[in-house]
Amino acid sequence: MCAGLMDGRDLSAGAVGAVKFVRNPISVARQLMAEKEVILVGDGALKFAKEKGAPLASHEELKAEEEKQLVTEGAHDTVGAVALDMGGNLAAGCSTGGLSGQKVGRIGDSPLPGGGLYADNHNGAVSFSGDGETIARLALAARVMASIEDGETLEQAISKGVAKLPGAGGAEADGGGIGIHKDGTIGWAHNSPMFAVGYATSAAAEPKIYLHKDEESSG
Ligand code: ASP
């Protein structure tokens, strides 16, 4: 598992990569935000999690989970989240089991600030899911921040980033991202066949839930 979290107030970030047995990697990433290190991986991440008393899974549970992933090859379990509070503070998070068939020790974009996630109170917050190698190579989250600084809307910025996925890492590369601008505007885009998104704002009575961008325009 990999997970990362970033605080737009001070750019503090915490992430764990290629860590096993930890039940809630994002909570361990949260605890790392208080430390000097930004990313811990593998045994080091597990050691840190244990020191912090993080709940762990047993060998049996881990094996069952790995077998389930083999059966559901191609399934994605990545969760990305962004938030803006009433004080104008932004945060971005991302958690993933990675890609099926990945090499032992492989880390994708999800724990990388500037890759799969970024939050900066001066710009916005964004979180990506998809082909991790390509997202990392393109530094997609960092590109979104730069585009916002150049005056683009959040949705333009994410769409432009997503459009770079095919070709940059091979024809198969796809994915999507969701973000929130410092002004509260929500934006999302994907070039994957589906991209499950949910968002809630103080202005709307009900949360919005979509599986594809096309559904948004029809309500
Ligand atoms: N981006 C994740 C990774 O490459 C996988 C995903 O989002 O499905 O590890």
Image (tube, helix red, strand yellow):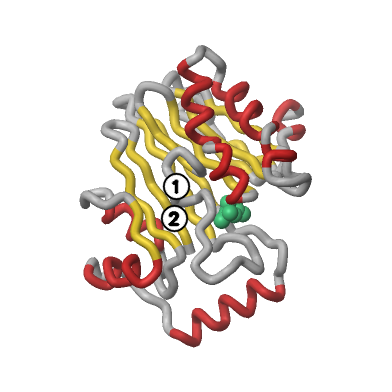
Residue appearing at x 65%, y 33% in the figure: 189
User: Mark 1 = which residue?
Assistant: 112
Residue 151 % position (x, y): 51, 12
Residue 215 lies left or right of residue 91; in this view the side is: right
Residue appearing at x 41%, y 50% in the figure: 4
Residue appearing at x 58%, y 43% in the figure: 135
Residue 219 % position (x, y): 71, 29
Q: Which mark is residue 50?
A: none
Q: Is residue 60 above or below residue 119?
A: below
The quarter holding residue 29 reads bottom left
Q: Label 1, secondary structure: give it.
A: loop
Q: Label 2, secondary structure: give it.
A: strand
Residue 217 % position (x, y): 73, 26
* Mark 2 residue type: Ala
Q: Residues within 10 Å of mark 1 (few under 14, many from 20)?
A: many
Q: Is residue 78 above or below residue 103?
A: above
Find the distance from the CA under tag 2 to the CA under tag 1.
Answer: 9 Å
Q: Quadrant of ligand 1?
A: bottom right
Residue appearing at x 31%, y 52% in the figure: 30
Query: Which of labels 2 and 1 is toward the front?
Result: 1
How many numbered marks does the figure carry?
2
Q: Residues within 10 Å of mark 2 (few under 14, many from 20)?
A: many
